[in-house]
Amino acid sequence: MDKWLEELEPIVVHQNLKVPYRYSMGATASKFFTEIRDHKRILGLRCPKCCLVFVPPRSSCGRCFSPLEEWVEVSDKGMLQTYTIVHYSTAVQPIPPPLIYGVIQLDGADTGLAHLISETDYERLRIGMRLQAVFKEGRSGNMLDIKYFKPIG
């Protein structure tokens, strides 16, 4: 080893580093988010073999591994499958706490979509309650184009 390296004292610097980047969502996610952005429509993909409808869509069936190509429109209404209430803050949360994350099975879909729930008291939440998507006015092509889901009925 070089002698000059042995005599160096390491310096440690603590800092936050921001690394901006861009990525492609791919064809499946791009179509899903474009439909929400441009038409307020939620689409899923139906499996040709087992007929499951996946929302959010994916390129292959999670049950039988068949490629998925048949787009179907599903409802913006559905049933709450599960939820959690978050009381602490992190940098990745889209709104300040307390907030509710739920998994909603939209009518016409066989899988659940994780999203925010609002316009309700925490005490009124129930598994099985009906919810409806509320879309943002200025949409940009991502999951937060659905602002949140709210109880109906």
Image (cartoon, grey):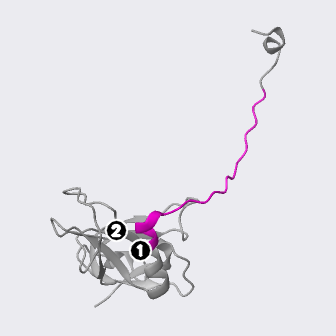
Answer above or below: position of 39 versus 3: below
- Give the residue number, with chain letter if any, for mark 2: 57
- Label 2 to label 1, Cα distance in Å? 7 Å
Seen at 44% across and 67% down, the residue is: 27
Callout 1: 10 Å neighbours few (<14), some, many (20+)? many
- The quadrant of the rendering that contains the N terminus is top right
**Magenta region, mostly helix, strand or loop?**
loop
The label shown at residue 32 is: 1
State the extent of the magenta-drawn residues as a range. Answer: 11-31
Left/right placement of residue 58 relative to residue 33 reads left
Mark 2 packing: few (<14 Cα in 10 Å), some, or many (20+)? many
Q: Is residue 146 left or right of residue 139?
A: left
* Contact (Cβ within 8 Å) of mark 2 with mark 1: yes
Residue 61: image location, x then y, percent: 25, 60
Is residue 106 visible in the rendered image? The answer is yes
User: As displayed, is residue 22 above or below residue 130?
Assistant: above
